[in-house]
Amino acid sequence: MRKCTPREIIKEVPDVQTVILPHNWFDDLGDNRSVFISLYEWMIGNGLVPSENEESLHNRTYVGEKLFKKLLSAEKKRLRKKLKIKGDELDRAVGWSDIDSGPKTEIGGCNISGDVILVIPETSRQTLGEFSAKIYRKQRDTLINKTRVNAAGATFYQWLLPQIDRPDRVGDTARAAVVDDQFPRESIQYEEIKSYLASHGACDAAIESLKESWVEYIQKYPERVQPYAWCSECGKKFDVKNALLAWSLESRELFVLDTACLNKYMQFDELVSRPLLGITHDDLSELVEKDEVSELDANDMIEQLNLWGIIPIASEGCNLQKTVSRKYTRRPISNSKRYVVLRRDKFQCVLCGASGSEANLEVDHIVPVSRGGTNDIGNLRCLCFKCNRGKHSKIE
């Protein structure tokens, strides 16, 4: 159970009186009076309570759980000695003593910490009720947020199951996933699910439906998506804490890279970088304005970081729903990246082996741009003119 401190109560509720028991107070207790009654009599007898609170003092008194344990122990000791009882019978007797006259130990479902005594006057009753409701709501919201993470439908696939009857793209995605035994049902990463669909020949419409479904899922349950990054160079998934946002001073393109791939890139192109963690929509807008980064690249990066769970969709003034249906746009491949691909593929067509000037070598997208392919190094390869024209928009 959550605890609230006397300081919190005093700050929120006016006219609260605080009382501290002397260290030797328990030494002078008699056997014929309840410890709780003795407490109230001591407070009144020493003028620690205004007269208007005396009649309902037991309803106005609150104590920290540390002090209450001491009071309860003293009452138990008194009843054991006076009534010669023990075990369950003693526990019941102590319970009835507490119910009859014991002070309160919690407010709004929260235990009061410490060993202080608080007297809250009748005039502060309404404010106390408002404060109780406030901390109760806070405790309830904490519990709800905690249980939502582990609730039914925690994975994207589980969330999809009840959506199969919907007459929209989300319903299309749900129906396709249900009949696909190999669908990554335990995954909570958009890129993993998208890669699976792309590798199985999914069309543009299927990818767009997935994206729209994913957007709705993470808008409702953002806490279920653990942010991760995917390297633009090697395509590997890695911890966002180790990710760098980099941009080329030549082509003004944006990349997400780990340190190793950044160093590899720097051999052929001059890049500027900064940690990806903490990047916002405004940061990317500033790169467009001050560093002349491509606005299209920046918008694509915002969408990508939204889908990865790095920038929350509902914040930063970014409405991803507007970009869900945006068509894929071909962007030029920088000369430095072309050279990296050609050198990697040994300046020959990876399909037929043709090389030299007569081969008319070109850099090809393995997954076509029209089907969601990117300019990432891992999606590029060297093809001769003939093989590239014969491929058209097929995924091989």
Image (cartoon, rainbow, N blue to C red):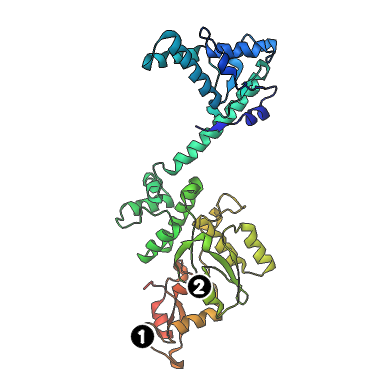
Horizontal side, residue 286 vs residue 334: left or right:
right
Q: Name the residue under label 2.
A: 261
Q: Could you tell me residue 78's position as x and y percent?
A: 48, 13
CA neighbours of label 1 inside 10 A, class few (<14), some (14 to 19), many (20+): few
Please state which of residues 194 and 85 is positioned toward the viewer in this rendering: 85
Residue 90 occupies quadrant: top left
Observer able to see residue 326: no
The dot on residue 204 is none
Does label 1 or label 2 sit earlier along the sequence?
A: 2
Q: Could you tell me residue 231's position as x and y percent?
A: 49, 67
Which residue is depicted at the point 37% across and 47% down?
158
Q: Name the residue under label 1.
A: 352
Q: What element carries label 1?
A: loop
Q: Could you tell me residue 341's position as x and y percent?
A: 47, 80
* Residue 379 against residue 29 in the figure, above or below: below
Q: How many marks?
A: 2
